Image: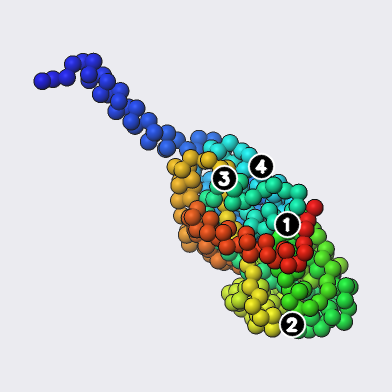
């Protein structure tokens, strides 16, 4: 028995309708994508974001435009993304401060685990503590002695208040038993002229931004903050090696989109980001920054946040820190 013409029409129509979801999943992206960075240009998050954006533009055949929205340790950019349309056209690249800000800023309602959808882990990097040569110290023990002889008179800075760099310095102060004065900046770009000019005595920031100046001897590296040394500064000890037992902090870079973004868009973006991070030229570029590739799935990023958020909440509580 052969189907009637009307039955054939219904069968064809049904087949087309079944194919529509698959077709819809292949139409992203159809226009430029905005990638928000919560910090000023020239810092580590900005450099990593621009590297990924350039490669994403090539792979997606759509321009990925970097948009720097500095402020509140990245909260401003994060909130823009969290409230954007869940369509994959507004993304965020963040440093590890994303796991801190919800606990540090008393007036914010932002919660990274609730208000953003994880896309991917990208890379990790140690921080380095560096001193201006004018203070005449080249080791951690020398610096601790210098600071103890001048309580409340040694100035130190980090790229932005509320970052892991900032809290690493607060941890160091408590563990070393010294009193230093924290000088806040609106990004690495704002801090660098002061540390290079000697107006700031010590800085703690990402290896990728301080290493070039350390190699030129315009800054003296005291230690890196991770338990292991970094290949980009192999002669610089860790803080643990230098006598601050148990000290271990690092930066990591991750990407997010708005909550309720369709699963197929998240899957596509994660696949493309991981492919980018695994490209030999990208891996080499990250290593020259002092960063180690750390490609990870959305679930990997969720687990990272589940570890980091409560750990930093405790550091903030123990140090009695609060930002306005």
* Element under disc 4: helix
Disc 4 crowd, CA 10 A, few/some/many (<14, 14-19, 20+): some
The residue pinned by badge 3 equals 257
Residue carrying label 1? 104
Crowding around mark 2 (Cα neighbors within 10 Å: few <14, some 14 to 19, many 20+) is: some
Of callouts 3 and 4, which one flags the residue occurring earlier in the amino acid sequence?
A: 4
Callout in the foreground (4, 1)? 1
Report the disc number at residue 57: none
Mark positioned earlier in the residue sequence (4 or 2): 4
Q: Which mark is residue 80?
A: 4
Q: Please name the residue shown 42% across and 34% down the image.
A: 24
Give me the residue at 66% from left, 75% from top: 247
> How far apart, in angstroms, are the residues tagged by discs 3 and 2?
42 Å
Q: For the point 45% across and 35% down, which residue is it? A: 27
| The one of 49 and 103 positioned closer to us in this rendering | 103
Name above or below for residue 92 compared with residue 3: below
Q: Is residue 125 above or below residue 134?
A: above
- In three-dimensional space, the C-alpha distance between marks 4 and 2, rounded to whole angstroms, equals 42 Å
Secondary structure at numbered mark 1: helix
Q: Residues within 10 Å of mark 1 (few under 14, many from 20)?
A: many
Label 1 to label 2, Cα distance in Å? 31 Å
- Horizontally, residue 12 falls left or right of residue 116, namely left
The percent coordinates of residue 233 (x first, y second) are: 63, 75
Q: Earlier in the sequence, mark 4 or mark 1?
A: 4
Instruction: Tell me, yes or no, whether the two marked residues, 4 and 1, touch with CB atoms within 8 Å.
Output: no
The foreground one among 17 and 26 is 17
Position of residue 36 measured from the top left corner of the image (x, y, whole percent): 64, 46
* Callout 3: SS: strand
Residue at coordinates 61% horizontally, 46% vertically from top-left?
A: 115
Number of numbered discs on residues = 4
């Amino acid at each position: 028995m052969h189907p009637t013409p009307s039955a054939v029409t219904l069968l064809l129509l049904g087949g087309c309708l079944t194919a529509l979801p698959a077709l819809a999943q292949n139409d992203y992206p159809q226009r430029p994508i905005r990638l928000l960075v919560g910090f000023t240009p020239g810092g580590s998050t900005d450099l990593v974001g621009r590297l990924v954006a350039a490669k994403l533009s090539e792979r997606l055949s759509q321009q990925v435009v970097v948009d720097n929205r500095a402020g509140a340790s990245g909260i401003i950019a994060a909130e823009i993304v969290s409230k954007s349309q869940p369509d994959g056209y507004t993304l965020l690249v963040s440093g590890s401060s994303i796991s801190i800000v919800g606990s540090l800023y008393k007036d914010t309602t932002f919660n990274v685990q609730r208000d953003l959808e994880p896309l991917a882990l990208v890379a990790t990097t140690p921080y380095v503590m560096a001193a201006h040569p004018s203070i005449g110290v080249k080791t951690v023990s020398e610096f601790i002695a210098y600071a103890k002889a001048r309580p409340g008179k040694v100035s130190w800075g980090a790229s932005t208040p509320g970052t892991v760099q900032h809290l690493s310095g607060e941890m160091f102060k408590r563990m070393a038993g010294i009193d230093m004065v924290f000088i806040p900046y609106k990004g690495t770009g704002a801090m660098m002229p002061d540390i290079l000019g000697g107006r700031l005595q010590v800085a703690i920031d990402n290896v990728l931004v301080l290493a070039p100046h350390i190699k030129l001897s315009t800054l003296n590296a005291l230690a890196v903050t991770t338990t292991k040394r970094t290949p980009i500064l192999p002669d610089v000890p860790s803080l643990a090696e230098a006598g601050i037992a148990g000290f271990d902090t690092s930066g990591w870079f991750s990407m997010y989109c708005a909550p309720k973004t369709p699963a197929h868009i998240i899957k596509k973006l994660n696949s493309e980001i991981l492919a980018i991070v695994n490209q030999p030229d990208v891996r080499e570029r990250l290593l020259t920054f002092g960063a180690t590739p750390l490609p990870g799935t959305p679930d990997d990023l969720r687990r990272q946040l589940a570890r980091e958020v409560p750990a930093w909440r405790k550091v903030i509580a123990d140090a009695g820190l609060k930002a306005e």
